[in-house]
Image: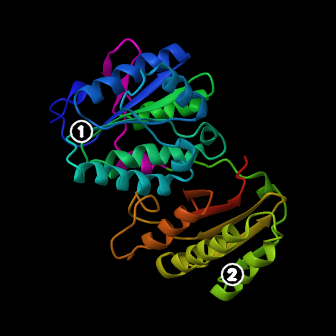
Amino acid sequence: MRSGAATGHVGYFHEAACYGTDDELLALALPFLLDGVAAGEPAVVSLGEHGAEVVRAALPAGSGVTFVTGGAIYARPAAAIRAYRKLLADYVAGGAGQIRIIGEVWPGNVGATWDSWARYESAINHAYDDFPLWSMCAYDTRRVPAHAVEDVLRTHPRTALPDGRHVDNAGFTEPMTYLGESREPAPDPLQHTEPMADLIDPALSDARAAVRAADHGQVPADEADDFVVAVSEAVANAQLHGVGPVRMRLWSGPDRIVATVTDAGPGPKDPFTGLLPVGNGADGGLGLWIAHQTCNHVVLHRHADGFTIRLTAGNPQH
């Protein structure tokens, strides 16, 4: 049984919750959470450190609200979807008729990696729609840039306001349309320098060797190993599912490694590719999903000359 603003709704009730003061955050969070507890619904907080402490301090002792570490969940978009789907499935298996979550895309993610998190916010309209979830996605407008707020309003069907109203977002764009739009990604500064490797139709062994040569210990060893696999998968996908020639370029910086793989084709047909595992992987979806799970930043870009995937290990920067 659904309650509150989501009464009668089937599937995912997805709201943006923009706030400019701590008091506004509390005006959004406290009624949402406590009403959920009163209705016997799981009520979960997945905010950054500051927001979580503000809410925790304002809740009554023994409130019944569950806190999870937002930074751990929001490490990477595809990993966040996987973690939340497991959390939601566990609650439903336990008999929950509605789950309430107020979450915050980790504050640092509204910077260099925002493009991938905007895709996440759009994709979860589909990814969580088989669960009785009501979520408020909190955005602190004191820290979130205006262009990101514009994306928030396009990727959320509705907005929760601090005065208690729930309004439709006139600019909401359906995920199939939003994810299919071509956006020119901001280049990593390393891409303005000479690449350390520039390979045309490389053998996978050569692609892997080039990535290993770019590893100077600037990223953790396990992350470097994952990056070798991710780049190899991207090259294999381009060779199998794209249109040749396939070009792989690689840059190595003091705190990151960046790779791009370009082919002359249009890219994956499924706009959810990478964020959700794709059935039998016939369009390269499984390999790109693996890359999204293991790389700190993944950019997919359709352009006049074809399709490019950019992968980053280490600290993404624009």
Q: Residue at x 37, y 23 (%)?
A: 160
Residue 130 in view in this figure: no
Circle number at residue 70 = none
Q: Which residues are magenta?
A: 157-181
Q: Kindly identify the amino acid type of the residue bearing the numbered disc 2.
A: Arg
| Alpha-carbon span between mark 1 and mark 2 | 46 Å
Q: Is residue 96 magenta?
A: no
Name the N-terminal-most of marks 1 and 2.
1
Q: Is residue 178 magenta?
A: yes
Residue 291 x %, y %: 55, 67
Q: Residue at x 58, y 65 (%)?
A: 294
Circle number at residue 208 = 2
Residue 175 x %, y %: 36, 46
Rate crowding at label 1 as few (under 14), some (14 to 19) or many (20 or more) other CA atoms within 10 Å: many
Circle number at residue 98 = 1
Give residue 136's quadrant in the image. top left
Q: Kindly identify the amino acid type of the residue bearing the numbered disc 1.
A: Gln
Residue 164 in view in this figure: yes
Residue 179 x %, y %: 43, 50
Name the image quarter holding the N terminus: top left
